[in-house]
Image (spheres, helix red, strand yellow):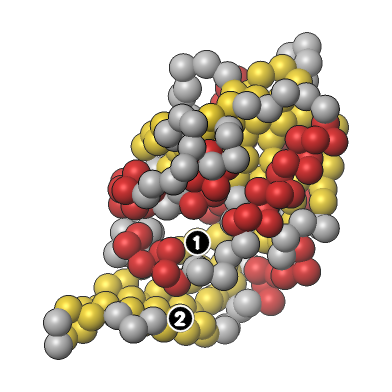
Amino acid sequence: MSCYDALAPWYDSLTGDVPYSAIADFYESVFSADGGEFRLLLDLCCGTGSMTWELAGRGYEMIAADRSVDMLMQAQAKQGPCRVPPLFLCQAAEELDLYGTVDAAVCCLDGFNYISAEKLAEVFRRLLLFIRPGGLLLFDIRTPDFLRSLDGQIFVDEKEDVLCLWRADFDEESSALIYGMDLFTKRGKLWERSEEEHIEYAHSPETLFALLEHAGFNNVRPRSDGPQGKAGRLYIIARRNENG
């Protein structure tokens, strides 16, 4: 089973409650408090590009990367008022390769939970290469306690032409929440069934802090007061070393 293949065309309609505008407001409050100049941003693990287009509409020049071709197709098909259209790249986070540096990198909606512990060090190493000295990295995770709380639960998302069933099982050996998903989509008078498997790894904040500092980031700090903070979403902010 693949991840974000059959789901891609339906992702936005099934996640209509995601507060992209509020998350962008949070990012801008961090930029404002930092006092630096932030014009060129990277949206890592951008998915269908909703956050990319939100930030582009606020005047930022955007580079967006994701490993899923299907999700990027949805992102590129969108339109929005912006000064410079976003540049979309098909790249896995651990294979990030840009032409130059950005002022900040963001990653929303627990994208880093989809990256295994074995790949995180390389992801942070590459981000250090492509964030300018003094630039920022902002991302969020679902906390380990929150992911464990979902063990054994079943979720149903239903729209007129699509039905999505999620079954969540937490595996202690791999420290990961595994979602088995059945997607039923309407094709004329019939319904087509597809299957996907999603894995979210339970990264402890302490592990992430240590990896970030080892990579060369400093002033690493958590924020639990961002959007969906009461639903187990923890924001992490780190600065790229001025001298590194």
Which type of secondary structure does the marked residue at label 1 adopt? strand
Which type of secondary structure does the marked residue at label 2 adopt? strand
Of the image marks 2 and 1, the number of the one nearer the N terminus? 2
Label disc, if present, on residue 157 of the rendered structure: 2
Residue 112 appears in the figure: no
Q: Amino acid at mark 2?
A: Asp
Q: In the image shown, does 39 or 240 lie closer to the viewer?
A: 39
Q: What is the x, y in percent for residue 224?
A: 82, 57
Quick one: label 2, few (<14), some, or many (20+) residues within 10 Å?
few
Q: What is the x, y in percent for residue 161?
A: 30, 80
Quarter placement of the N terminus: bottom left
Q: Residue furthest bottom?
A: 189
Q: Is residue 221 above or below residue 215?
A: below
Label disc, if present, on residue 74 of the rendered structure: none
Q: Is residue 36 above or below residue 109?
A: above
Q: Is residue 46 left or right of residue 207?
A: left
Q: Are marks 2 and 1 in contact (CB under 8 Å)?
A: no
Q: Is residue 187 left or right of residue 152?
A: left
Quick one: label 1, few (<14), some, or many (20+) residues within 10 Å?
some
Quarter placement of the C terminus: top right
Q: What is the x, y in percent for residue 183?
A: 33, 76
The residue indicated by pointer 1 is 199
Seen at 44% across and 46% down, the residue is 80
Q: Amino acid at mark 1?
A: Ile
Q: Residue 241 appears in which quarter of the rendering?
A: top right
Q: Residue 158 appears in which quarter of the rendering?
A: bottom left
Q: What is the x, y in percent for residue 12?
A: 43, 64
Seen at 85% across and 36% down, the residue is 33
Q: Residue 135 appears in which quarter of the rendering?
A: top right
What separation in Å lies between label 2 and label 1 (alpha carbons)? Answer: 18 Å
